Amino acid sequence: MDKQNIKQAIREAVHKVDGRRIVAAAVVAALLLVWIPVDSVRVHSRELSAHIESLELQIEELTSENRELKIENEELASKVELMSQALSLQAQSEEVRQEEEARLSEPTEFPVTGAVSMIEVTKKDIEEKKKETASAQDIAQVEPLASDTPIMIFTATAGNTVIASGAGVVESIEEDEIYGKMIVIDHGNGYQSVYRNAGASKVEAGANVTRGTVLFVINSNNTVIGFQIKQDGEYVDPMDVVDIAG
């Protein structure tokens, strides 16, 4: 083979090698172009999946918190209802208590324990007795006790007691020229009750008394009791207030 042919063969061989390199390079480039986007998509997909999982976890946590808040709200509503009922009962109890206190403060209790004899005496009654030509003894017995204001007069036997006809405060204890002593109880509702007797007072001025508190103990020398009631400063007929049957 001459030199010219040798050179030609070398050029052809080099050309074939360069062509193969070009093809190989093109294949590699194509593979890179395909692989890179696929890998990017995979990375992005993983990020999206992680984000979705995070959102789902947040949703689950919020749902759980919502359930807990709902339960807490129901418990609070139940507590509020119970407190409301308790306050209502307390208000009702307070109202009942006040009504009971008001009832017990009214001077309706019969003011003497045990068996008694009772008369109502006013100066007008005395004049009527005189007109009826009642005996001098009857007139002499009641005339000193006569009053221009309504009064109930009792005679009781030893061992009985004079009691407060209603709850209140002892307003005063004074000397009484006819009966000996006079106790006045203020019941705080416009009513005052007045007890007249010759016995020793069992209470002191300013003392709180309840219905039935003993004011005097009846002995042989203080068997006569005078009882009066005032309403808003004016004497009223005790018979209209006191529960005689009680």
Image (cartoon, rainbow, N blue to C red):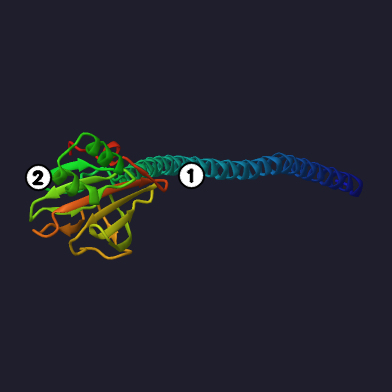
> Helix, strand or loop at disc 1?
helix
Measure the alpha-carbon separation of dots 2 and 1. Answer: 77 Å
Dot 2 amino acid type: Ala
Q: Which of marks 2 and 1 is nearer the N terminus?
A: 1
Left or right: 129 in relation to 56: left
Quadrant of the rendering where the C terminus is positioned: top left
Please tell me how crowded label 1 is: few (under 14), some (14-19), or many (20+) other residues with Cα within 10 Å: few
Query: Who's the residue at 27% across and 47% down the image?
Result: 146
From the top left corner, tell me how far across and down residue 219 is, in percent.
10, 59
Whether pointer 2 and pointer 1 mark residues with C-beta atoms closer than 8 Å, the reply is no
Residue 199, relative to residue 68: is it above or below?
Answer: below
Label 2: few (<14), some or many (≥20) within 10 Å? few
At label 1, which amino acid type do we have? Glu
Residue 120 located left or right of residue 102 = left
Q: In this view, does 145 lie to the left or right of 236?
A: left
What residue appears at the point 68 percent right and 44 percent down from the top-left corner? 40
Residue underneath mark 1: 65
Report x, y in % for residue 218: 12, 57
Farthest residue toward the right?
4
- Give whichever of 102, 109 is nearer the camera: 109
Compare residues 182 and 4 and report the one nearer the observer. 182
Say the numbered circle drawn on residue 115: 2
Decide if residue 82 is in sight here: yes
User: Is residue 131 or residue 170 the one in the foreground?
Assistant: 131
The label on residue 149 is: none
Is residue 211 in view?
A: no
Q: Is mark 2 on a helix, strand or loop?
A: loop
As drawn, 43 above or below 183: above
